[in-house]
Amino acid sequence: MSAKEEFIDAQIKCDKFFSSLEPPANLVTDDVDSFLRRHAGDETPVAIVTSGGTAIPIERNTVRFIENFSTGTRGAASTEHFLANGYAVVFLHRHQSIQPFFRHVSLAEVFDEGFHPENVKMHELYNEVKRTNRLLRVGFSTLCEYLWHLRRIAKSADQCGSRALVYLSAAVSDYYIPFDKMEEHKVQSGCEALTLHLEPVPKMVYPLRNEWCPKAFVVTFKLETQQDLLADKSRSALLRYGHQLVVGNLLDTRRREVFIYDQNGSVRLKLSDAEFTEGAEIEDKIISEVVTRHRHFHKMKEIIGREQ
Ligand code: PMT
């Protein structure tokens, strides 16, 4: 299949996916639009950060889900670093996954002791973010909710042009059970084996890049469990989608080491043993790198825009 045919095929699959699934009752609307409109108006850079894992229901009256491992730490920590760099953030997160700011605070601190000295800076940032209204949280549980919200938010972020950055760190299910193939009621136990038929989830990076917010800077993630697959898979994602960055990580070492791939090559970011022991976070390094590149991207788009 040529690149163009692959793109058209993906576009058809994505449209089919959305038309086969009802939007969630709580689909984000005005809140997101006004949040993004305000920050587009005051020229604040905006990051859409996705975080946590998506659940796949196996019955329409859902009793059971297929789940994945993601805790949401990457998305929550990255959100704090984007905020510290002056961004406004739409944090699209799995319900009950790790949350920015709150992840640092223990119940003992809240009820008894006041903030731990190390958390004072974080507390100041939290207050400043609240005052300037730079964080909007949107929750999801299922794959369907995640994708409907993502599409809605990304389309609205188009008004921010190249000041928008989309950071897809959620662990998105690769397979799901289409609604018309789902059992209506609880799958009964008692049979010797249970066979489920799952179908591939269309890759949403295609419409995101080409249709929803084509001017935005897009960062995807690539998770593998084998080092020798990581580079090839990350580079082929860049080629396929033509976006700006892929952050490659391995399941076991994801808290200490990542690789950032762009169209020209890659860099390795790593916490030293000392940094890791002192509680430094790899997201600090990832976001510095991503923000530098996004600023450059935005500046170039402005220059090109002025010359046209
Ligand atoms: O949450 P933590 O415990 O801190 O862990 C962080 C993490 C390991 C989950 C994170 O660093 C990470 O790697 N997230 C992406 C995992 C993933 O879904 O990889 P993938 O190879 O399935 O997808 C690659 C990219 O395509 C992702 O950016 C994903 O958002 C996107 N995608 C995936 C499926 C789909 N149908 N459409 C997509 O656009």
Image (spheres, rainbow, N blue to C red):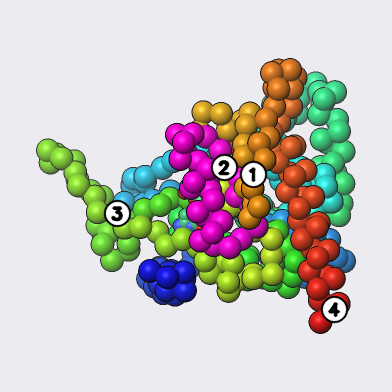
N-term mark: 2 or 1:
2
x and y, in percent, of residue 67 in the image: 41, 42
Q: Say what amino acid the circle numbered 4 marks.
A: Glu
Which disc number belongs to residue 266? 1
Note whether ligand 1 is within 8 Å of mark 3. Answer: no
Left or right of residue 174: residue 113? right
Is the Cβ of the residue at disc 4 closer than 8 Å to that at disc 1?
A: no
Q: Say what amino acid the circle numbered 2 marks.
A: Gly
Instruction: State which quadrant residue 258 falls in.
Output: top right
Where disc 3 sits, the SS reads loop
Q: Quadrant of the C terminus?
A: bottom right
Categorize mark 4 by other alpha carbons within 10 Å: few (<14), some (14-19), many (20+).
few
Queried whether the magenta region covers residue 160, the answer comes back as: no
| x 31%, y 51%: residue | 58
N-term mark: 4 or 3:
3
First to last magenta residue range: 222-250
Can you identify the residue that label 3 sits on? 198
| x 80%, y 53%: residue | 87
